[in-house]
Image (spheres, rainbow, N blue to C red):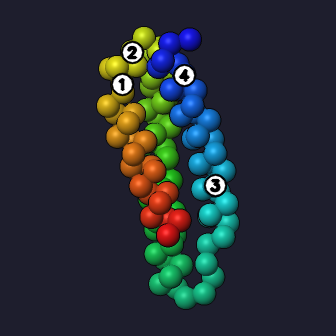
């Protein structure tokens, strides 16, 4: 297995874990105070957007084949970093 395939597999596994965590966080949206709920919901929606962008990039790479890892690497790493940042903002 090539390095790109290994990295892609790890990313897909992590993406699945983040998807489950995102759904858990959405389910636990605070009910006290409209502003707090709005801010939290906004951060959840931001994370969902970043998740979908990362998922799309991984899908593009999967469709292109692992031989194209270097071509897609920058976009995937950017999307991944943005998703991780969104998750950290939501968790705090």
Q: Earlier in the sequence, mark 2 or mark 3?
A: 3
The x, y position of residue 66, in whole percent, is 47, 15
Q: Nearer the viewer, mark 1 or mark 4?
A: 4
Q: Earlier in the sequence, mark 4 or mark 3?
A: 4
Write down the residue under mark 1.
72
- Asked whether residue 85 appears in the rendered view, the answer is yes
Helix, strand or loop status at disc 1: helix
Q: Earlier in the sequence, mark 3 or mark 1?
A: 3
Helix, strand or loop status at disc 4: helix
Label 3: few (<14), some or many (≥20) within 10 Å? few
Residue under the point 60% across and 56% down: 22
Q: Earlier in the sequence, mark 1 or mark 4?
A: 4
Q: Earlier in the sequence, mark 2 or mark 4?
A: 4
Q: What whole-number distance in Å separates the C-alpha atoms at marks 2 and 3?
A: 30 Å
Write down the residue under mark 3.
21
Q: Are marks 1 and 2 in contact (CB under 8 Å)?
A: yes
Label 2: few (<14), some or many (≥20) within 10 Å? some
Q: Quadrant of residue 53?
A: top left
Residue under the point 50% across and 12% down: 2
Q: What whole-number distance in Å separates the C-alpha atoms at marks 1 and 4?
A: 15 Å
Does 59 sit left or right of 14 as displayed? left
Q: Which disc is residue 60 wearing?
A: none
The x, y position of residue 89, in whole percent, is 45, 64
Q: Which disc is residue 6 wearing?
A: 4
Q: Which disc is residue 68 wearing?
A: 2
Q: Is residue 31 above or below residue 62?
A: below
Q: Are marks 1 and 4 in contact (CB under 8 Å)?
A: no
């Amino acid at each position: 297995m090539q390095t790109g395939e290994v990295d892609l597999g790890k990313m897909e596994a992590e993406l699945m874990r983040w998807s489950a965590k995102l759904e858990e966080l959405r389910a636990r949206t605070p009910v006290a105070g409209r502003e707090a709920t709005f801010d939290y919901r906004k951060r959840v929606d931001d994370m969902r957007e970043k998740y979908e962008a990362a998922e799309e990039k991984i899908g593009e790479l999967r469709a292109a084949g692992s031989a194209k890892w270097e071509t897609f690497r920058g976009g995937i790493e950017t999307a991944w970093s943005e998703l991780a940042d969104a998750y950290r903002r939501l968790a705090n």
